[in-house]
Amino acid sequence: MADPLVLAKAEAAYEWCRNATEATDKPWVYLLIPNDAVDESKSLAGLAATSMSSAIKAR
């Protein structure tokens, strides 16, 4: 999750979502969720709440 390549791809995905949202007036969101955070007991909303999307937006 700290790998520069992963973070660069996440930044590009965030920009893509921002542009897609502007172009379509529909919300697009990118979530960077580590593999070990995903299991059957967690909901998408729960994963989204703990994802790195807010860290990417802050850049």
Image (cartoon, rainbow, N blue to C red):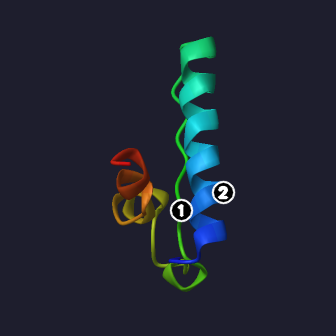
Q: CA distance from mark 1 to mark 2?
A: 10 Å
Image x and y of residue 45, in percent: 41, 56
Residue 5 appears left or right of 41: right
Q: Amino acid at mark 2?
A: Lys
Image x and y of residue 40, in percent: 55, 78
Q: Residue at x 59, y 56 (%)?
A: 10
Q: Which mark is residue 9?
A: 2
Image x and y of residue 27, in percent: 51, 27
Could you say whether the residue bearing mark 2 is in a helix, strand or loop?
helix
Image x and y of residue 38, in percent: 54, 77
Quadrant of the image occupied by residue 4: bottom right
Quadrant of the image occupied by residue 55: bottom left
Q: Residue at x 54, y 13 (%)?
A: 25
Q: Nearer the viewer, mark 1 or mark 2?
A: 2
Q: Amino acid at mark 1?
A: Leu
Q: Return the disc, 1 or 2, that comes first in the chain's sequence.
A: 2
Residue 24 appears left or right of 53: right
Could you say whether the residue bearing mark 1 is in a helix, strand or loop?
loop
Q: Which mark is residue 32?
A: 1
Q: Relative to 5, is 23 above or below? A: above
Residue 38 appears left or right of 56: right
Q: Are marks 1 and 2 in contact (CB under 8 Å)?
A: no
Observer-nearest residue: 53 or 4?
4
Q: Which mark is residue 1?
A: none
Q: Relative to 48, is 35 above or below? A: below
